[in-house]
Image (cartoon, rainbow, N blue to C red):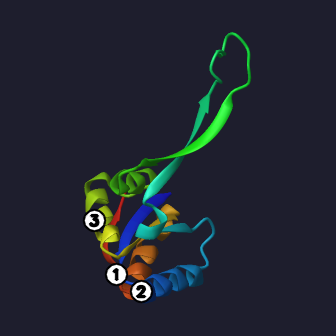
Amino acid sequence: MSKIAALLPDEEIAENATDRLAKLNIDDLTWELVRDEDNRERILPVMAWPAGNSAQGGGVPVGIVTRADYPEEKALEDRGADHDDADFYAQSVAHGATAIIVDAPDEYREQVRTALQNAGATRISQE
């Protein structure tokens, strides 16, 4: 499988790109859109034992959810963006662009790149 990442400058291009990818009708072709409003924070579960108890001494852990800042470039790398381009993608997403990360079978990577390019995607890269 190849990972292909690209920037989609606006919603119209994002919709055009996903439509073109869907029309390729390739088995195992998947993609994820990364938008600024969707990815500002990562939610982390935190487990703790109530005061006076410990993991070894019994008691039931108490679960809470906390939010932690999570750098966007790391989130994009985790999703498959090329390490060298992840910061550029993150900065672009922070300024209103949408990133797309596509998992494509190796034999279709050029077809996917062409579909993204024809849709208006920019900065197309692959791993």
**Residue 23 image offset from top left, x and y in percent:** 58, 84
Q: Residue furthest top?
A: 57
Task: Note whether 55 is above or below 67 in the view shown.
Answer: above
Of labels 3 and 1, earlier in sequence is 1
Q: What secondary structure is found at the residue carrying circle 3?
A: helix
Looking at the picture, tell me which residue is in the foreground, 104 or 11: 11
> Mark 1 and 2 residues: CB-CB less than 8 Å, in contact?
yes
> Mark 3 and 1 residues: CB-CB less than 8 Å, in contact?
no
Instruction: Tell me, for residue 13, which label it has, or none.
Output: 2
Q: What secondary structure is found at the residue carrying circle 2?
A: helix
- Residue under label 3: 91
Estimate how packed mark 3 is, as few (under 14), some (14 to 19) or many (20 or more) residues with alpha carbons within 10 Å. some
> Mark 3 and 2 residues: CB-CB less than 8 Å, in contact?
no
Q: CA distance from mark 3 to mark 2?
A: 18 Å
- Residue under label 1: 9
Q: Residue furthest front?
A: 51
Task: Note whether 51 is above or below 104 in the view shown.
Answer: above
Q: Name the amino acid type tagged 1.
A: Pro
Of labels 3 and 2, earlier in sequence is 2
Tally of numbered tags: 3
Answer with left or right where residue 51 lies relative to residue 105.
Answer: right
Q: What secondary structure is found at the residue carrying circle 1?
A: loop
